[in-house]
Each structure stands twice: as structure tokens, then as C-alpha cells.
Amino acid sequence: MTTGLRERKKQATRVALHEAALRLVAERGLDRVSVDEIAAAADVSPRTFFNYFPSKDEAVIGLDPEHSLRLAEALSTRPADETPIQALRAVQAATAERMAAETELWPLRLQVVEAHPVLAARLTATFAQSERELAEWLAARTGTRADLDVQPTLLAAVQGSVMRTALHRWSAGGYTASLPALVDEGWDQVEAGFPAPHR
């Protein structure tokens, strides 16, 4: 089996487990679903489940464990004359397009997370870890230290806040708005320096 095919099969299994976990928890509630039931719904063994997720909670949230790495790789391909904000905005726009294409999964994921505080806390921790990793990457790229220089940490926090705000507005509006457009609006505010709202 080629590496590409193997990776696609692994990704397909991961997605199947995540979708099974998400749909079962949406139907029954977090405490009424077991790992064995999730594995059975995805047609794999419980042992295989733990090859992909360390816990039921992680399977329900289902975020890409290599998101920070993929973000760094995407940023590495941006033109050298772009400002950090321009590069982050362009990369996040592509991410928002992919998320919006998951027309059922993201809304369902957000609904399930909002209904279970333990999942909301786990998702917040995942976002925070992603921001720390991004700050370290940005600092390394500019020859600074994320724990001493304000810019890498602040940039990582800003990009995270733009996405979280867009997701919240997307959810509050019943998922009728365009997620990429909401992300764009957030970056417009950042780049404009948060002008006073029109009255």
C-alpha cells in the first residue's frame, strides 16, 4: 500500500469515528454513549478507536491534531512581502472555506459542544494549545521568543479570536451566513484598528 493511500485510509477512519461520535452524542447525550458504541458505528474495533483518539471527548470534538503544523506549513508558502496579518488572514480564509464546506459537521459539532460544558472546556483548551504552538512558530520565524516578544503571542491570539468570533456569529445566526465572510469581517476590523461603529 502506498503512503498516500495509507494516509487517506487513516484519515477516512478518523473521520468515520468522529462522525459516529458526534451523531451518537447529539442523539443521546455525552454520558449515554460509550467508546464501544462509537467504534461499532464506525465499523472498527475499540482498540482501533484508541489508535485515533485518546478519549470519547476528543472523538466528539474531532479537531485535526496536526492543525498547527498545517497552519505553519501554509504560512511558510505565503509571499515574503506580506505582513504577518496579511499572511494569517489569507491562510485563515482558506481554513474557513474548508470548514464551511462541512455543511453538517461544523454546525452539529458546535451544537453538541454548546450543550456539554466539559466539551466546551476541552475545545477551549485545544484552541489555546494551538495558539501557543502558532506563537512559537511565529517567534522562531522572526528570531524572537514567544514568551518575551509581544508580537508572536498577540498575533496568534488575534487569529484565534477572529475565528472563534466568526464561529459564534455563525452559530447565533443559524448558520445562514457565510463563514468565510464572517471571518473576513473580523479581519477587516483588525486591520482597520477597530473603528467606532456607525450609528
Image: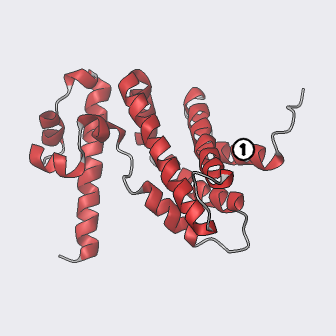
Does residue 75 appear left or right of residue 59 in this picture?
right
Residue at the outermost bottom position: 2
**What residue type is disc 1 on?**
Glu
- Can residue 120 be seen in the rendering of this structure? yes
Residue 103 visible in the displayed image: no
Up-down relation of residue 132 to residue 71 (above or below):
above
Outermost residue toward the front in this view: 148
Position of residue 45 in the picture relative to residue 18 (left or right): left
Instruction: Work out whether 108 lies above or below 99.
Output: above
Return the x and y of residue 16 as percentages of the image width and height: 25, 48
As drawn, the residue found furthest toward the right would be 199
Q: Is residue 21 above or below residue 138?
A: above
Front-most of residues 86 and 8: 86
Q: Position of residue 187 (x, y in %)?
A: 71, 48
The spot of residue 12 in percent (x, y) is 27, 56
Q: Quadrant of the N terminus?
A: bottom left
In the image: residue 13, left or right of residue 70: left
Circle 1 packing at 10 Å, graded few (<14), some (14-19), many (20+), is some
Residue at x 59% of width, y 54% of height: 92
x 65%, y 48%: residue? 154
Task: Give coordinates of residue 178: x percent, y percent.
Answer: 62, 43
Which residue lies at the image location 32% right of the left edge and 27% below the top edge?
26
Colour mode?
secondary structure
| Quarter of the figure with the C terminus | top right
Q: Secondary structure at mark 1?
A: helix
**Tag 1 residue:** 185
Image label count:
1
Image quadrant of residue 90? bottom right
Residue at 48%, 42% in the rendered image:
127
